[in-house]
Amino acid sequence: MMTATVSRLPGDVAFWDEFLAAVRQRLGETTKFSREEPLAAKTTIRIGGAARLYAEPGSVRDFQTLMVAAAAAGIPVFPLGRGSNLVVPDEGVAGLVLSLAHEAWAGFEPRVDGLLWVGAGLRLKNLCGLAAKVGLTGFEFLEGIPGNVGGALRMNAGAMGGWMFDVVEEVRFISLDGTLRTASRAELHVDYRHCAELQTAIALGALLRPVAPAEMESVARQIDVYKKKRQESQPRDPSAGCIFKNPPGNSAGRLIDQSGLKGERVGDAEVSPIHANFIVNRGSATSADLIALVRKIRKRVVDAHGVELEPEVLLFGKEWRDVL
Ligand SMILES: Cc1cc2nc3c(=O)[nH]c(=O)nc-3n(C[C@H](O)[C@H](O)[C@H](O)COP(=O)(O)OP(=O)(O)OC[C@H]3O[C@@H](n4cnc5c(N)ncnc54)[C@H](O)[C@@H]3O)c2cc1C
């Protein structure tokens, strides 16, 4: 039993070491499992510390082993996609980070019934590219979103007028207790940048419904149009995408811009001069810099417009309300 072998407190280095040693021997050879894995390079904004425990499970069984063991030891679990909607705290993450980086989760399987099965670890860019190659259309709007399918499901990512769940038929996920489940779109509670079920479960893959087949050239043309639009409107510096959700009927970027905040900095965290709803890392920003800048923006926007902006980007392993 995990609880019998792991006897120390989470503040204690040995607690994590013992968990790793006890669980590693039960995992398959292709599953990476490590201690103090640096996370900054696994995120697009390149900020933050290490994960006390980090794994890239290579099979459903290993996911289950890790999740059941973590639950038994009282260790919180945090799924990681491509880290494009996350800020990792400077002190790192006190838990088990489960990444979908293993190739087992990057599947792309068109089916004879016209539907498309994709793994949660498949990059959205690859989903669009592969779909275009086989003449499947309807995913072009996802092309420039730098996440993978799992992150896009959890966030109900959206762009160019489309949302991830517009194309979802069903999602396969694993709950914190290790139970494997498939839920149809209708069974899932989906909202703006949110899928309720995936707050407490890890998506492993999804069945998608393409729209009517189209010529490869026209799909590629549409992708180019979206790409150009993005290149013109978004910064290239490291960021975590839009930092705040758009308030109902309003634009967070416009409110921040109108509050005179473009170019505002705390340390190396800067409100992008190109798109005011992006905070960019100018070199060696810390999460403390970014959080201080988020506070500053929120205060200025409340003072100028009476609107309280809610972060869209997630603080990995923490709640914004605890730091703002
Ligand atoms: C330059 C830039 C442009 C962007 N443009 C857009 C845009 O146009 N539209 C948009 O919606 N977003 C945009 N984003 C934000 C981000 O790319 C999306 O939210 C994306 O869907 C996140 O995917 P990810 O794999 O990077 O998830 P991560 O950032 O790794 O994770 C995000 C959240 O999902 C959880 N998660 C990750 N994988 C899973 C899984 N398999 N199961 C359950 N939970 C999981 C994580 O724990 C975390 O809570 C942009 C980001 C950047 C940097």
Image: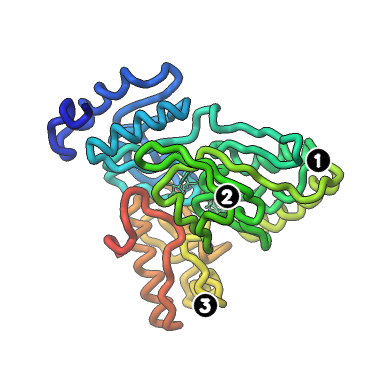
User: Residues under labels 3 and 1: Cα distance?
Assistant: 43 Å
Q: Earlier in the sequence, mark 3 or mark 1?
A: 1
Find the residue positioned furthest to the left.
Answer: 8
Look at 54% across and 32% down and name the residue there. Answer: 105
* Residue depicted at x 53% and y 69%: 253
The answer to which image quadrant residue 124 occupies is top right
Q: Which residue is mark 1?
A: 135
Viewer-nearest residue: 52 or 264: 52
Quadrant including the N terminus: top left
Say what amino acid the circle numbered 3 marks: Gln
> Three-letter amino acid code at disc 2?
Ser
Residue 118: x %, y % from top left: 62, 38
Real-space CA distance between mark 1 and mark 2, rounded to the nearest whole angstrom: 25 Å
Element type at mark 3 = helix
Q: In this orientation, does residue 81 appear?
A: no
Above/below status of 324 relative to 223: below
Instruction: Give the amino acid at mark 1.
Output: Gly
Residue 39 is drawn in which quadrant?
A: top left
Residue that numbered label 2 is attached to: 184
Task: Please tell me which of labels 2 and 3 falls first in the chain.
Answer: 2
- CB of residue at label 2: within 8 Å of ligand 1? no
Q: Residue at 48% x, 75% y: name it.
A: 260
Mark closer to the chain start, 1 or 2: 1
Quadrant for the C terminus, please: bottom left
Note whether residue 153 is visible. Answer: yes
Q: Is residue 129 left or right of residue 65?
A: right
Q: Are marks 3 and 1 in contact (CB under 8 Å)?
A: no
Reading the image, the residue beneath label 3 is: 258
Q: Position of residue 65 (x, y in %)?
A: 35, 29
